[in-house]
Image (spheres, helix red, strand yellow):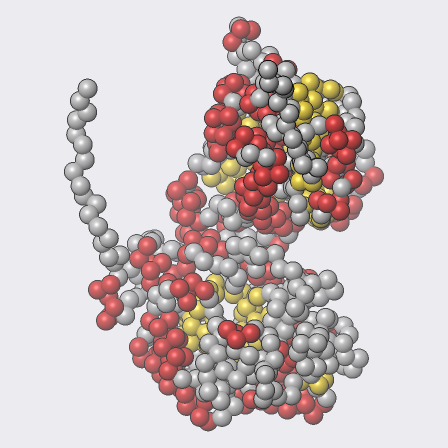
Amino acid sequence: MAGPVIQVTQPGEVPWPLRRIAVIGGGPGGLYAAALLKRLGPEREITLWERNAPDDTFGFGVVLSDETLGGIEHADPVVHAALQREFVRWDDIDIVHRGHTQTSGGHGFAALGRRRLLEILHERCADLGVRLRFRTEAPPAAELAASHDLVIAADGVHSRTRDAHAESFGPRVTGHRCRYIWLAADFALDAFRFETAETAYGVMQLHAYPFSRPAPVRHPSTRPFGPPDESGASTVIVEMREEVWRAAGFDTCDTAESTRHCAKIFAEALGHRPLRSHHSSWLTFRTVVNERWSHGNTVLIGDAAHTAHFSIGSGTKLAMEDALALAACIEEQPRLPAALAAYESERRPVVESTQRAAAASLRWFEELGTYVDQPPRQFAFNLLTRSRRVTHGNLRLRDASFTAAVEDEFGCVPGTPPMFTPLRLRGLELRNRVVVSPMDMYSATDGVPGDLHLVHLGARALGGAGLVMTEMVCVSAEGRITPGCTGLYTDEQAAAWTRITDFVHAGSPGTAIGIQLGHSGRKGSTKLMWEGMDQPLDEGNWQLTAASPIPYAPGVNQTPHALDRAGLEAVRERFASAAERADRCGFDLLELHCAHGYLLSGFLSPLTNHRTDAYGGTLTNRLRFPLEVFDAVRERWPDDRPMTVRISATDWAEGGTTVEDAVEIARAFVAHGADAIDVSTGQVVPFERPEYGRSYQTPYADRIRNTLCVPVIAVGALSSWDDVNSLLLAGRADLCALARPHLYDPHWTLHAAAEQGYTGPGAPWPLPYRAGSRTPPTGRTDAPKPRLTLD
């Protein structure tokens, strides 16, 4: 007779399938994970600890998306049906600013009371046999991990589990600049409402939405999960910058006084009705990021693993989606380590995308004061598209009439997308708002641009962009980045550039071509990009000069000489001489390169400028030499032609240039006559930590434009014409510069026009190419469709 089957595990390996599961935290994520895992494995012993009472919760309403609800429907129809009975649904967003209400429809929201959501999940867990231990502090995660097969830490933004094992999870918690408080109103709003209040202390904002409607009387048997805890109610969040909060005296108010004061400030929105609180206090939002989401048999979900700002309503959504994914991966994988790895692999990209959108939304509200002077419709459009998840294109689908009104206010001729509206800078009128960004070709000989440059720039000029920019053109031989960089310090180079500008003007009438002048500084004398970016030449290196004797990469790049007075004067004259040549070459616009760690940028950043003379120390002093160069170039450049300046608005490194510095840098250049600021970021120091993502640099252009009311060029991971239209219409940029999309498709602008059905003067096809202005057919699309279905 065979004996019992013994499951042999390796040291530290968790038995499979899971039998004992501990859940720390009784929020929606923890409860839903417990319910799903119990439903999928009825034999499992699952215990959930929650230190608060069952009906003790923070906040009032929660918003869930149709996508999340779809996942819930497939995973647990019982919970889905209960939620469906409770939801308040609406489509409109009302944006109230300076007495004007702009309404945009077609958005689709579903919300319910947070307490009601918890009740539904409590009853589902109880029905399935999950042990719920309320008012009980969970044992330490390490203790639970020793006695359970799996520990799910759903213990929120202040997770004790995460903190206790910080060396394993690698948490990074970032605070932000606003204070906010969760309150409620005992009536149901008709729509999601955003409202600004410009007070004597500064700008305050209200975020509010309904989560409960007055319910009709029903027979108890039709409501298996009991009555709702609210009848006609709305969540109301009041938010403001820290300094506004203090100036208004909220820092010395108790909760009751704060609640009354908020109701008074937003009395019109509330119909002069009171607000109420429940465990409410003024908070500072904290963004939580973890390098790893699991440690042994302990896993983080929800706010313990990640947070996303409430302005995009994703906290509960993400937590419940985490629970769904975790349960699914446990069912699909053969062992726990594989399941936890699969869970993180599946969820991390989704969460990071949401966090990027939430960060953009958070920053928008932090900088709300810079937008209050926008026209009402543009302000509303800007707010709606703040996270970059809602764009001009999908807003047109949701609410065509609202979007058309915004376009009309912007100045779009009917049928003209924003990107094809003209822009004037001094005597130059650009026929559209698309710029081919400077892109180094590293293909010159002795600084002379050749056929590749003619074809590269000529093709993009034929491709429809309003402005085509050269790569950084160096003002001296020793100012080159690589031996393949172009220059404008000899007559031979000038003749080659004239050949290119002549082609652009003759071959693509109406297209402007601009030159970007720069000097490599400490980042020079390196190999071609594809041979080793920022790596010194194997031989033939030339001496470098910079603001300070600091190598770009210590031990790799050479130490530059700090420019003395004679050196400063010589460099300034080389820039001015190059500007004279650029004029004779026929360029329409000149840009001074003060970004990316090259010479002039090296003076601006405190990380690269350690001078103790008049050109170092304070920002005013660090600006001195770049402004002297600008003035010298502006004096030699024709007065009717515009000059722009490219800056790095942040160094993405501690102690470097900040966005506040960037505003002051831009302010100084504009005061000296700059017509627009080209706002890039980084590439100043090798230890930078950029926050990459779609349109990730555009908030810096936005900040400068709306603080100083100056034209800006936005750059950085712009890839779609929808992004361009959105940025322009929202008033975050005046021109949009794209690089890689123009490498992929030299006719990117013309194709953008064709895809939008635009055939106007903002994007004329060259006559020889006009026959290709329609998308070629790819196959038969008119096959006969079935007419009858026979049983």
Left/right placement of residue 482 relative to residue 418 reads right
Along the line of sight, which residue is nearer the eye, 450 or 650? Answer: 450
Between 118 and 36, the one nearer to me in the picture? 36
Instruction: Give above or below for 87 relative to 424.
Output: above
- 203, 633: nearer the viewer: 633
| Image coords of residue 623 (percent x, y) | 69, 75
Image quadrant in which you'd find residue 311: top right
Quadrant where the C terminus sits is top left
Residue 736, horizontal then vertical, whole percent: 47, 63
* Nearer the observer, 306 or 565: 306
Can I make out residue 513 in this image? yes
Residue ranking furthest to the bottom: 491
Residue at image point 34% right, 68% down? 463
Name the residue at 59% across, 52% down: 371
Q: Is residue 234 visible?
A: no
Q: Percent x, y for residue 330?
A: 57, 32
Q: Quadrant of the N terminus?
A: top right
Q: Is residue 41 above or below residue 477?
A: above
Which residue is drawn at the image coordinates 52% and 54% (left, top)? 694
Query: Residue 84: x and y, percent?
Result: 50, 21
Query: Is residue 450 toward the left or the right of residue 533 in the image?
Result: left
Number of labels in the image equals 0
Q: Is residue 77 above or below residue 247?
A: above
- Residue furthest toward the right? 252
Residue at x 50% of width, y 82% of height: 484
